[in-house]
Image: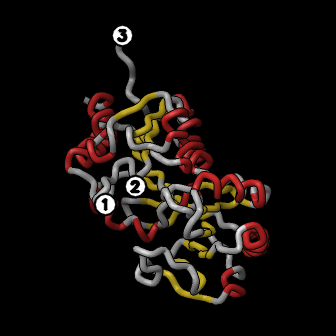
Amino acid sequence: MTHSPPRVIATDLDGTIVRSDGTISARTVAALARVERAGAMLVMVTGRPPRWMTEIATAVDHHGVAICANGAVVYDLHTETVLEAKEIPAPVIAKTVGRLRSVAPELRFAVEHPDGFLFEDSYDLGRWDAKALGGRPVGSEELVTHNGTKLLAFHPDADPDSLTEKAVKAVGDLVTVTHSSGRGLLEMSAQGVTKASALAALCTQHGVTSDGVTAFGDMPNDLPMLTWAGTSYGVANAHPLVLAAVTHKTSRNDDDGVAEVLERLFP
């Protein structure tokens, strides 16, 4: 029996098709090119902000559409322009920050925007230089006076799973909380905004239902997308929650697990 290939391929980037050294292999680039060549739609679905997509767009020869900031921003890789952004209103950001400070005073905050981000002076991620990544330091009061596509909260010592659980209890009625870095870094979007909500909306525009979507991921921020898609794959290096939720598994990101599947789907 011959099965039709999926109409949409949706894949996370870091930890899924991006290798541990930050590169995308030639094999994976070639496999991604097969998707559009076959007439299917390729969607990169990532927690990254749009400004971190330039290298990815170049690596994949500007193929496909990207959903950035965990569903808050839709970005055209062909033209490298923002098509749509769903922001957290400033009053909600202020309320969220206030509640989180009361339950975890060690948290340091930053707010993402489509073209940059603001961060508190205490927002120190160690190996990442916030200014070099496009950030601007501001006082805590100014931080919460701007709308944002994503609110970030970093705890230098916390386990990411337990920190996320605590945050959901504290602010889950205000924002959508997730994590993806393996460190105590919370990622918060507007209420109801997830990788799945943005992907579902994009698919609806193209007349595609979830049954026509095959998705790939590795971290908890991918779970809404992976459970929405008709077919889902977790790479072998994925978070245990992801491996428990997907319909299929494939090889590690460093072993081109996504390419392995795409080569079968689009021979």
Instruction: Identify the disc placed on residue 3.
Output: none
Q: Distance between the residues labelled 1 and 3?
A: 39 Å
Of residues 22 and 73, the one drawn nearer to the viewer in this rendering: 22
Figure quadrant of the N terminus = top left
Residue 37 place in picture, x, y as percent: 29, 40
In the image, what residue occupies the spot 45% across and 75% down?
126
- Asked whether the beta carbons under mark 1 and mark 3 sit within 8 Å of each other, the answer is no
Q: What element carries label 3?
A: loop
Q: How crowded is mark 1: few (under 14 residues within 10 Å), some or many (20 or more)?
A: few
Say above or below: 159 vs 1.
Answer: below
Q: Residues within 10 Å of mark 2 (few under 14, many from 20)?
A: many
In the image, what residue occupies the spot 55% across and 46% down?
199
Q: What element carries label 2?
A: loop
The tag earlier along the polypeptide, 1 or 3, is 3
**Position of 146 compared to 181: left or right?**
right
Instruction: Identify the disc placed on residue 22.
Output: 1
Residue 94 sits in which quadrant? bottom right
Which residue bears the numbered disc 2? Answer: 14
The tag earlier along the polypeptide, 1 or 2, is 2
Which residue bears the numbered disc 3? Answer: 1
Residue 262 sits in which quadrant? top left
Residue 65 place in picture, x, y as percent: 43, 53
Amino acid type, callout 1:
Gly
- Asked whether the beta carbons under mark 1 and mark 2 sit within 8 Å of each other, the answer is no
Looking at the picture, the colour scheme in use is: secondary structure
Residue 101 place in picture, x, y as percent: 73, 73
Amino acid type, callout 3:
Met
In the image, what residue occupies the spot 44% across and 37% down?
234
